Amino acid sequence: MKISLDKLIRRETDKIDLNFCQKVDTINYCDTSYELACPISINGKISTTKSGFYLDADVEFTVLDNCSRCLEEVEVPIEYSIQGFLVKEDFDEDSFEDDDAFIYDGQDIDLIQIIEQTLDFKLPARVLCDEDCKGLCPGCGANLNKEACSCNEIANDEEIIDPRFAKLKDIFKND
Protein backbone atom coordinates (compact mmCIF):
# COMPACT_ATOMS: atom_id res chain seq x y z
CA MET A 1 0.00 0.00 0.00
CA LYS A 2 2.46 2.59 -1.26
CA ILE A 3 1.51 6.24 -1.61
CA SER A 4 3.53 8.55 -3.85
CA LEU A 5 4.57 11.85 -2.28
CA ASP A 6 5.78 13.19 -5.62
CA LYS A 7 3.11 15.92 -5.92
CA LEU A 8 3.81 17.13 -2.37
CA ILE A 9 7.55 17.15 -2.94
CA ARG A 10 7.21 19.13 -6.20
CA ARG A 11 4.70 21.45 -4.40
CA GLU A 12 1.95 20.80 -6.97
CA THR A 13 -0.51 20.34 -4.11
CA ASP A 14 -0.52 20.94 -0.38
CA LYS A 15 -2.32 17.70 0.61
CA ILE A 16 -3.07 14.17 -0.54
CA ASP A 17 -6.41 12.67 0.50
CA LEU A 18 -6.38 9.09 1.71
CA ASN A 19 -9.85 7.60 1.37
CA PHE A 20 -9.69 3.98 0.28
CA CYS A 21 -9.93 0.32 1.20
CA GLN A 22 -7.36 -2.22 0.15
CA LYS A 23 -7.30 -5.97 0.62
CA VAL A 24 -4.21 -7.13 2.48
CA ASP A 25 -3.75 -10.79 3.43
CA THR A 26 -1.57 -10.43 6.52
CA ILE A 27 -0.05 -7.84 8.79
CA ASN A 28 3.06 -8.45 10.88
CA TYR A 29 3.58 -7.39 14.46
CA CYS A 30 6.25 -8.59 16.93
CA ASP A 31 7.33 -11.53 14.78
CA THR A 32 3.71 -12.70 14.46
CA SER A 33 1.79 -12.65 11.22
CA TYR A 34 -1.92 -11.85 11.66
CA GLU A 35 -4.42 -12.78 8.95
CA LEU A 36 -6.93 -10.07 8.08
CA ALA A 37 -10.65 -10.82 7.75
CA CYS A 38 -11.50 -7.68 5.78
CA PRO A 39 -9.75 -4.99 3.73
CA ILE A 40 -7.87 -2.21 5.51
CA SER A 41 -9.84 1.05 5.40
CA ILE A 42 -7.87 4.30 5.57
CA ASN A 43 -9.43 7.76 5.73
CA GLY A 44 -7.33 10.88 6.19
CA LYS A 45 -4.72 13.00 4.52
CA ILE A 46 -1.05 13.79 4.14
CA SER A 47 -0.50 17.53 4.24
CA THR A 48 2.40 19.94 3.95
CA THR A 49 3.33 21.88 7.10
CA LYS A 50 6.25 24.12 8.10
CA SER A 51 7.95 21.10 9.68
CA GLY A 52 7.39 18.76 6.74
CA PHE A 53 4.73 16.28 5.67
CA TYR A 54 2.10 15.39 8.28
CA LEU A 55 0.06 12.17 8.21
CA ASP A 56 -3.36 12.23 9.87
CA ALA A 57 -5.43 9.12 9.15
CA ASP A 58 -8.00 6.80 10.70
CA VAL A 59 -7.38 3.08 10.17
CA GLU A 60 -9.91 0.23 10.42
CA PHE A 61 -9.46 -3.50 9.87
CA THR A 62 -10.30 -6.86 11.43
CA VAL A 63 -7.64 -9.31 12.57
CA LEU A 64 -8.15 -13.07 12.95
CA ASP A 65 -6.71 -14.31 16.25
CA ASN A 66 -7.27 -17.27 18.58
CA CYS A 67 -9.25 -17.21 21.82
CA SER A 68 -6.89 -17.34 24.80
CA ARG A 69 -9.00 -19.99 26.54
CA CYS A 70 -10.40 -22.35 23.88
CA LEU A 71 -8.18 -21.53 20.86
CA GLU A 72 -11.16 -20.96 18.54
CA GLU A 73 -10.63 -18.39 15.78
CA VAL A 74 -12.00 -14.93 16.68
CA GLU A 75 -12.41 -11.77 14.61
CA VAL A 76 -10.91 -8.77 16.43
CA PRO A 77 -11.90 -5.33 15.05
CA ILE A 78 -9.13 -2.72 15.24
CA GLU A 79 -9.77 1.04 14.87
CA TYR A 80 -7.35 3.83 15.63
CA SER A 81 -5.79 7.06 14.38
CA ILE A 82 -2.29 7.56 13.07
CA GLN A 83 -0.82 11.02 13.43
CA GLY A 84 2.77 12.02 12.86
CA PHE A 85 5.36 13.56 10.60
CA LEU A 86 6.88 11.81 7.60
CA VAL A 87 10.63 12.33 7.75
CA LYS A 88 13.79 11.28 5.93
CA GLU A 89 16.19 8.95 7.71
CA ASP A 90 18.61 11.74 8.71
CA PHE A 91 15.98 13.85 10.55
CA ASP A 92 16.66 15.90 13.71
CA GLU A 93 14.98 14.00 16.56
CA ASP A 94 14.79 17.13 18.74
CA SER A 95 12.51 18.81 16.19
CA PHE A 96 9.91 16.04 16.54
CA GLU A 97 10.24 15.38 20.26
CA ASP A 98 6.50 15.73 20.99
CA ASP A 99 5.26 14.09 17.78
CA ASP A 100 5.54 10.69 16.15
CA ALA A 101 7.89 10.52 13.19
CA PHE A 102 7.68 7.90 10.42
CA ILE A 103 10.71 7.43 8.21
CA TYR A 104 10.22 7.18 4.45
CA ASP A 105 12.63 6.62 1.60
CA GLY A 106 12.55 8.23 -1.81
CA GLN A 107 9.24 9.44 -3.16
CA ASP A 108 6.87 6.89 -1.54
CA ILE A 109 5.58 5.89 1.87
CA ASP A 110 4.40 2.40 2.71
CA LEU A 111 1.21 2.68 4.79
CA ILE A 112 1.31 -1.03 5.73
CA GLN A 113 4.71 -0.50 7.29
CA ILE A 114 3.40 2.51 9.25
CA ILE A 115 0.36 0.51 10.41
CA GLU A 116 2.66 -2.29 11.60
CA GLN A 117 4.77 0.25 13.52
CA THR A 118 1.72 1.76 15.24
CA LEU A 119 0.01 -1.45 16.42
CA ASP A 120 1.73 -1.28 19.84
CA PHE A 121 -1.25 -0.81 22.11
CA LYS A 122 -4.00 -1.45 19.58
CA LEU A 123 -4.01 -5.26 19.67
CA PRO A 124 -5.62 -6.69 22.82
CA ALA A 125 -3.28 -8.57 25.15
CA ARG A 126 -5.80 -11.40 25.48
CA VAL A 127 -8.56 -12.29 23.04
CA LEU A 128 -11.69 -14.11 24.18
CA CYS A 129 -14.41 -15.57 21.97
CA ASP A 130 -16.90 -14.89 24.79
CA GLU A 131 -16.60 -13.55 28.33
CA ASP A 132 -18.07 -16.85 29.57
CA CYS A 133 -15.67 -19.04 27.57
CA LYS A 134 -15.00 -22.26 29.50
CA GLY A 135 -11.72 -23.01 27.72
CA LEU A 136 -10.07 -26.38 27.24
CA CYS A 137 -9.98 -29.30 29.66
CA PRO A 138 -6.45 -29.53 31.10
CA GLY A 139 -6.67 -33.33 31.11
CA CYS A 140 -7.98 -34.32 27.69
CA GLY A 141 -7.99 -31.00 25.82
CA ALA A 142 -11.73 -31.05 25.03
CA ASN A 143 -13.32 -27.70 24.21
CA LEU A 144 -15.65 -27.29 27.19
CA ASN A 145 -17.85 -24.86 25.24
CA LYS A 146 -18.79 -27.60 22.76
CA GLU A 147 -18.61 -30.87 24.69
CA ALA A 148 -18.62 -32.23 28.21
CA CYS A 149 -15.36 -33.62 29.49
CA SER A 150 -15.38 -37.16 30.90
CA CYS A 151 -11.91 -37.09 32.47
CA ASN A 152 -13.17 -37.08 36.08
CA GLU A 153 -15.58 -39.98 35.50
CA ILE A 154 -12.86 -42.22 34.04
CA ALA A 155 -9.93 -41.32 36.24
CA ASN A 156 -9.33 -42.64 39.73
CA ASP A 157 -7.01 -41.17 42.34
CA GLU A 158 -3.95 -43.06 41.08
CA GLU A 159 -4.29 -41.65 37.55
CA ILE A 160 -4.76 -38.05 38.69
CA ILE A 161 -1.52 -37.90 40.68
CA ASP A 162 1.41 -36.38 38.87
CA PRO A 163 4.11 -39.09 38.58
CA ARG A 164 6.72 -36.66 39.89
CA PHE A 165 4.83 -36.52 43.21
CA ALA A 166 3.79 -40.18 43.44
CA LYS A 167 6.51 -40.97 46.02
CA LEU A 168 5.12 -38.29 48.34
CA LYS A 169 1.83 -40.18 48.50
CA ASP A 170 3.66 -43.28 49.76
CA ILE A 171 5.13 -41.28 52.66
CA PHE A 172 1.66 -40.62 54.07
CA LYS A 173 0.50 -44.27 53.77
CA ASN A 174 2.55 -45.28 56.85
CA ASP A 175 0.58 -42.94 59.17
Image: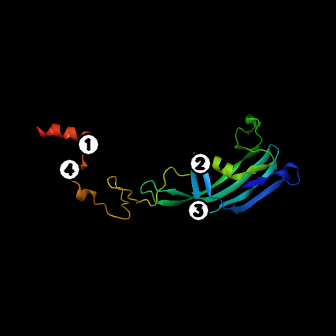
N-term mark: 2 or 3: 2
Residue behind mark 2: 29
- Residues under numbered marks 1 and 3 in contact, where contact means CB atoms less than 8 Å apart: no
Q: How is the image coloured?
A: rainbow
**Point 46% across, 60% down: residue:** 72
Q: Residues within 10 Å of mark 4 (few under 14, many from 20)?
A: few
Tell me if label 1 and label 4 are in contact, CB under 8 Å: no
- The vertical placement of 160 against 24, above or below, is above
Classed neighbour count for the residue bearing mark 1: other residues with Cα under 10 Å, few (<14), some (14–19), many (≥20): few
Q: Name the mark nearer the viewer: 1 or 4.
A: 1
Amino acid marked by disc 1: Pro
Which of the 4 quarters of the picture holds residue 3? Answer: bottom right
Quadrant (top left, top right, bottom left, bottom right) of the C terminus: top left
Residue picked out by circle 4: 157
Q: Amino acid at mark 4?
A: Asp
Which numbered marker is on residue 37? Answer: 3
Q: Earlier in the sequence, mark 2 or mark 1?
A: 2
Tell me residue 22's x, y (percent). Answer: 69, 61
Q: CA distance from mark 4 to mark 2?
A: 45 Å
Q: Residue flagged by tag 2: what amino acid is it?
A: Tyr
**Vertical arrangement, residue 110 with respect to residue 74, above or below:** above
Residue plotted at (20% across, 48% down) = 158
Q: Considering the numbered disc 1 on the image, is that residue within a helix, a strand or a loop?
A: helix
For disc 1, the marked residue is 163
